[in-house]
Image: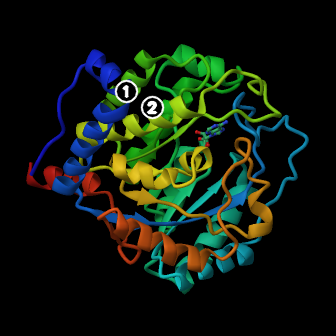
Amino acid sequence: MVSGISISKQEIIELLALRGEEQAELHRKSSAARRDSVSDRIYIRGLVEFSNICVNDCCYCGIRSSNKTVKRYELTPDEILSCVDEAASAGLTSVVLQSGERSGSGFISYILKFIRLIKEKYPDMGITLSCGEQDRSVYKEFYDSGVTRYLLRIETSDEDHYKKLHPESMKFSKRIKALKDLKETGFQVGTGVMVNSPFQTPEILAEDILFFKEFDIDMCGMGPFIPHSSTPFADIGFSSENNFNTTLNMIAVLRLVMPFINIASTTALETLSPGGRESGLTAGANVIMPQFSPFSKRGDYGLYDNKFTGPEDSRSFIAALAERIQELGLIPAPQEPGTSIHYIRKAEDVSHS
Ligand code: 5AD
């Protein structure tokens, strides 16, 4: 079995800048690395954005707490179950449940309630949760309720950069601690960064890749930074094309460095360019997460301007998506649980030592 390449910061910086034929060559290499490690199978997970209420005030994010223009919502457990019904009837066996960050016992028992409902009806449904930083004991409750994967983006691995993107109240050290708590609880842990966010340098992006390796993550989601009009970064200059291409190269380099992890091709790629998620797969991603939130609510989960919402009929969308995946020479695998092979291999290493 192949193992990841060793690479220096400088080499990563050079790879991230490739465009044209050299970029296509990089993506051919990362696709080959995917084939040799996790195979050509593409996992499809239904994404349910169950609440846009958030206590954090991140400078880049459209659902930041101080944005009073957002219509806030929280789906009821039954509404969430209906979304999961939709995903199941489209043939999916895995869902990602995501929300803004909140804490407190009310919020936690609400989450435990709908997880129980989902597990009662679909005992084998894979559940990924993403609802921010929580106490370690809360992570344990989530894990014990049947959640096996957790996503918490670090957003940037550089502490000074983190401070420029977040309010004083959000601490980089707390984010790292949360990621460690998740890992020690037993989750498959996913993290990620925005690509070309304000004040980010190519050097920081290279360090992000090395951080993922060092932390030994199981899954990764990275998307291009896209400004939101009701945030402090509304008027910051940005190149849609550059952010798009740098994101694709981040995916490709990460696939070469960590061949066995799950890498998502994100909605933000699709937002910048129709078919952008397919480009992410061509660059080496192996997971795609189409929306299954109620159609009427999708516009309210506005992390950035013009966020792609997908069509209302998620079921026919899945069928069309599966066809497009096949056209790329890849294998749609909605029926597979999609456990991170990196995570499985780590567990095997421990049991053999
Ligand atoms: N552009 C791109 N991605 C964003 N996110 C939040 N705001 C933006 C933005 N303006 C991403 C963050 C967060 C995830 C849910 O969405 O990385 O973790």
Q: Is mark 1 on a helix, strand or loop?
A: helix
Which comes before the other along the chain, label 1 or label 2?
Answer: 1
Residue 338 appears in view: no
Residue 281 spot, x, y in % from top left: 38, 53
* Label 1 close to label 2 by CB (< 8 Å): yes
The one of 67 and 17 positioned closer to us in this rendering: 17
Q: Name the residue under label 1.
A: 16
Q: In which quarter of the image is residue 294?
A: bottom right
**Measured from the top left, where is residue 222 in percent x and y?**
48, 41
Identify which amino acid the numbered label 1 is placed on.
Leu
Mark 2: few/some/many CA within 10 Å (<14, 14-19, 20+): many
Residue sitting at x 61%, y 74%: 314
- The residue depicted at 36 percent of the width and 67 percent of the height is 327
| Residue for badge 2 | 246
Q: Can residue 159 be seen in this view?
A: yes
Quadrant location of ligand 1? top right
> How many other residues sit within 10 Å of disc 1, few (<14), some (14-19) or many (≥20)?
many
Q: Quadrant of residue 124?
A: bottom left
- Residue drawn at x 18%, y 28% is 6
Q: What element carries label 2?
A: helix
| 165 relative position to 250: left or right | right
- For badge 2, the amino acid type reads Thr
Instruction: Examine the rendered structure and indicate whether residue 251 appears above or below residue 186.
Output: above
Left/right placement of residue 59 relative to residue 283 reads right
Colour scheme of the picture: rainbow
